[in-house]
Amino acid sequence: MGGQALAVILIVLAALLILGVPIAFSIGLASIVTILATVPLKVAVLTAAQRTFVGMSSFTLTAIPFFILAGNLMNEGGIAKRLVDFVMAILGKLPGALLVTNIGANALFGAISGSASAAAAAVGSMVKQGEEEMGYDKALSAAANGASAPAGLLIPPSNALITYSLVSGGTSIAALFLAGYLPGFLWALGCTIAAIIIAHKKGYTGVEGKFSWSNLGLATLRALPALGLIFVVIGGIVAGVFTATEGSAISVIYALILGLIYKNLNFNKIIDILIESAKMSAIVVFLIGVSNILSWVMAFTGIPQMIGNALLSVTSSPVVLLLIMNVILLISGTFMDVTPAILIFTPLFLPIVESFGMSPVQFGIIIVYNLCIGNITPPVGNTLFVAIKVGDTNLQKVIPYMLRFYAFILIGLILVTYVPAISLHLPQSAGLL
């Protein structure tokens, strides 16, 4: 039963995606077709409607629209320039200073905005002129910008981790948020090392002159209000002052006030932001709803157990099993967005890793880290293509540089996969595990 159901899901899903049907409708239709193989039409439609409603009715899910709205307010609120200046004041003396600044600012801005593509667009645009004036290779600048932007999806607040929490059966969001910090910074560190090595070979020097504490102090003061969002929201969630959903609402108020203080928001802009946020939220929430049908179908037909048994029949080694899962996730991430991939693969792989004692928190970081690599890998690679567009270059010129960034990012993936402390140390220290 499980094998036939899996074949139906894969065939129908692949056919619909090839025809250009949106991923949410493709998942829903593939699930209904699979249900029809076991139950009558009326029961199938009723079950699908019920599971969709259940999937969208979680209180925790409310956090995603709020964080999307907060991110959009931040994107338009004028914080990118302040973050770039802050990172430049710290890292400006390193070889390839603007490349390194781009990477550091992407990690911060991506964490605040919750969008890798937004980080690549906003921060990349801020440093572009300076990089051109200093004679940086456009393709290298685009590669550094695109490669580093997904780091912010691991550093909280992260909608990807909230989605994982929902589909994994209620894994602590506070624990996941804390678990994302070190892997996110590890990603950014890997990109920084790659950028410095390349910059050194090309002879790109840092900013001339002595390090200025006064410049750092001024840049820090200007950036503190924006950085405060991370401390207020994440600190409150981890400390138990408020839930992730309440924290997301606070982040909206914080972002709105900040944008008004910076005088980058007006009534018309706010209306446009609300409309755009509503559209983005509707897509994400509907996708989660229909994916709940797929989760139910897989559980009902025993697909996770079948896949688990198949993998365990190949090997019982956790090391090899994790390697196989990583390869599957890396390949899938090149064709799928992060959210639907989390919704599909979590119920398949989570029971397997839990069977050999892995924490669901660590696996959440592993799956998000894997799928974030897909954000910068063709043929989908949305964030990479945003960076290429901002950098005014092309894929053929960028890929040779990206290969070097991929190498360090993959080293980070291996460490996150096989060194549990990287993900679990902070939540354990905070008493969340």
Image (spheres, rainbow, N blue to C red):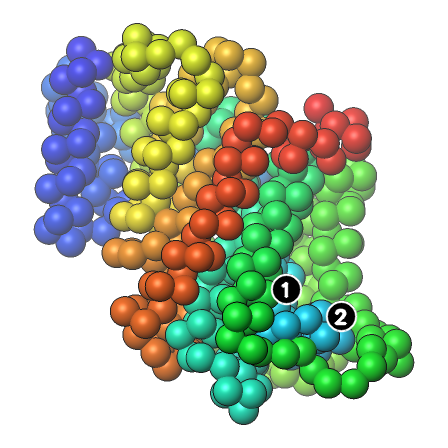
On the rendered structure, is 103 left or right of 250? left
Q: Which quadrant of the figure contains the C terminus?
A: top right
The answer to whether residue 222 is above or below residue 198 is: below
Q: Where is mark 2, residue-wise?
A: 90
Element at badge 2? Answer: helix
Which label number is shown at residue 131? none
The answer to whether residue 216 is above or below residue 3 is: below
Q: Which residue is depicted at the point 51% across and 75% down?
A: 202
The numbered mark, 2 or 1, whose residue comes first in the sequence reads 2
Q: Which residue is depicted at the point 78% across and 37% down?
A: 240
Q: CA distance from mark 2 to mark 1?
A: 10 Å
Residue 373 x/y as whole percent: 42, 49
On the rendered structure, is 93 left or right of 213? left
Location of residue 223 (image quadrant): bottom right
Q: Which quadrant of the figure contains the N terminus?
A: top left
Q: Where is mark 1, residue-wise?
A: 104
On the rendered structure, is 350 left or right of 93? left
Q: Is residue 242 visible?
A: no
Callout 2–callout 1 Cβ contact below 8 Å = yes
Q: Is residue 334 visible?
A: yes
Location of residue 324 (image quadrant): top left
Task: Report crowding for label 2: few under 14, some 14 to 19, many 20 or more residues within 10 A (C-alpha).
Answer: some
Q: Amino acid at mark 1?
A: Gly
Element at badge 1? Answer: helix
The answer to whether residue 81 is above or below residue 276 is: below
On the rendered structure, is 395 left or right of 229? left
Residue 410 x/y as whole percent: 47, 44
Q: Amino acid at mark 2?
A: Ile
Task: Report crowding for label 1: few under 14, some 14 to 19, many 20 or more residues within 10 A (C-alpha).
Answer: many
Residue 390 x/y as whole percent: 42, 78
